[in-house]
Image: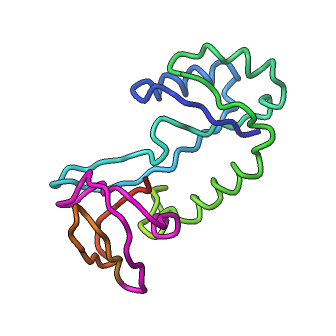
Amino acid sequence: MWIVAKIKSKESSVFKQQLREKLKNEVKFYEPKVFYKIKNIKKIKNILGSYIFCFNEKFKDYSHLNSTRYTKGLNYFLKDYKNSQNDILKFITFCKNYEDKNGFLVKDFFKKIIHKRGKFLNGPLANLVFEILENNKNNLVINVRQKKIQIRKNSRIFYLPT
């Protein structure tokens, strides 16, 4: 059963290690990530921020989840995960369909999920929020700080929805 954990970003590896120890190494993790460059510096970013998917059959029983509540690096587990299994699986499958051979999400993933607003991850407009004015076959026409800009869809610019 999949659960969603909010973790302390700097303690991700400690959280994973301790959760594996508590559940006898039977845990799978999934973090949809992107790989990009800013000024020739390689960056990897979890698109869900400090959230991570965790799978273990023992999560069907709340007592096993309670025994992991105090895992180092964990803030909390999201509630109502049992009723959200179909949605979680759909999202994970959707993400995996847009991964490259190294497990990173490709740009086409973002084109499918961004409909109105986004935030640039790299390039000269890094960290700026934009509004989509037009989304056609080859270009994305956006509004950034009251300026209308056209970006080719095959460019190397990454963005996330806001």
- Residue 139 vs residue 124: left or right? right
Q: Is residue 17 above or below residue 95?
A: above
* Residue at x-position 20% and y-position 49%: 41
* Residue drawn at 25 percent across, 57 percent down: 122
Please tell me whether residue 126 belongs to the stretch shown in magenta: yes
Where is residue 139? Give x, y as percent.
34, 81
Answer whether residue 10 is magenta in the image.
no
The residue sitting at 60% across, 31% down in the picture is 5
Residue projecting furthest to the bottom: 137
How many numbered marks, from 0 up?
0
Q: Residue at x 41, y 61 (%)?
A: 117
Residue 130: x %, y % from top left: 32, 61
In the figure, is residue 113 to the left or right of 38? right
As drawn, the residue found furthest toward the right would be 61
Magenta stretch bounds: 109-138
Residue 86: x %, y % from top left: 77, 51
User: Does 41 appear above or below 28?
Assistant: below
Viewer-side residue, 116 vs 97: 116
Locate residue 34, reporting x and y percent: 40, 54
Colour scheme of the picture? rainbow
Q: Is residue 10 left or right of residue 66?
A: left
Which quarter shows the N terminus?
A: top right
- For this orientation, the residue located farthest to the front is 146
